[in-house]
Image (spheres, grey):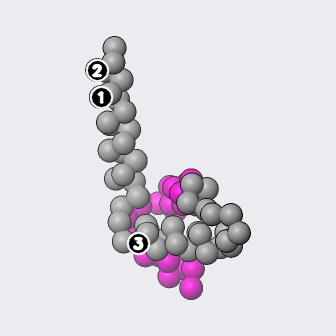
Amino acid sequence: MRSDLIFGALAHVENRYQLCQLASKATRKLHKPNTRLQDTTNDVLLRFHETNPAAGSAVSAHQTAIQQRRAA
C-alpha cells in the first residue's frame, strides 16, 4: 500500500511537506510515457525508503557551487 511506502520514506525525510516536494520532482524526472503515474510515484517512494533523497540534492548543489567558483 502507498501509506506503507510513505511512512518508510519519512524515515529519511524531515517532514511530510519536504517529502511531497522531493517526490513530485523525482516523479516528474523518472516518469516514462505509456506507464501509469501511480506506478512511477510508488517507485519513487520505494527508492526514498531505501536511500536518503535529500542527501543527493545537497551534494549536487555543493558541487555546482564549487564548479562556479572555479569558473570565476
Q: Is residue 7 visible?
A: yes
Give percent across and percent down for residue 32: 63, 63
- Residue 61 is left or right of residue 42, and the answer is left
**Is label 1 in contact with label 3 (beta carbons under 8 Å)?**
no
Which marked residue is nearer to the observer: mark 1 or mark 3?
1
Closer to the N terminus: mark 1 or mark 3? Answer: 3
Circle 1 residues within 10 Å: few <14, some 14–19, many ≥20: few
* Element under disc 2: helix
Closer to the N terminus: mark 2 or mark 3? Answer: 3
Residue shown at 50%/60% (left/top)? 19
Residue located beneath label 1 in the image: 66
Give percent across and percent down for residue 40: 59, 69
Magenta span covers which residues?
1-26
Q: Amino acid at mark 3?
A: His
Residue toward you, 39 or 11? 39
Residue toward you, 19 or 64? 64
Residue 30 covered by magenta stretch: no
Quarter of the image with the N terminus in it: bottom right
Q: Quadrant of residue 64?
A: top left
Circle 2 residues within 10 Å: few <14, some 14–19, many ≥20: few
- Residue 60 is left or right of residue 4, and the answer is left
Residue located beneath label 3 in the image: 49
How far apart are the two marked residues, 2 and 1, measured between alpha carbons?
A: 6 Å
Q: Quadrant of residue 63?
A: top left
Q: Residue furthest bottom?
A: 1
Quarter of the image with the C terminus in it: top left
Q: Is residue 17 visible?
A: no
Q: Is residue 62 above or below residue 29?
A: above
How far apart are the two marked residues, 2 and 3, measured between alpha carbons?
A: 35 Å
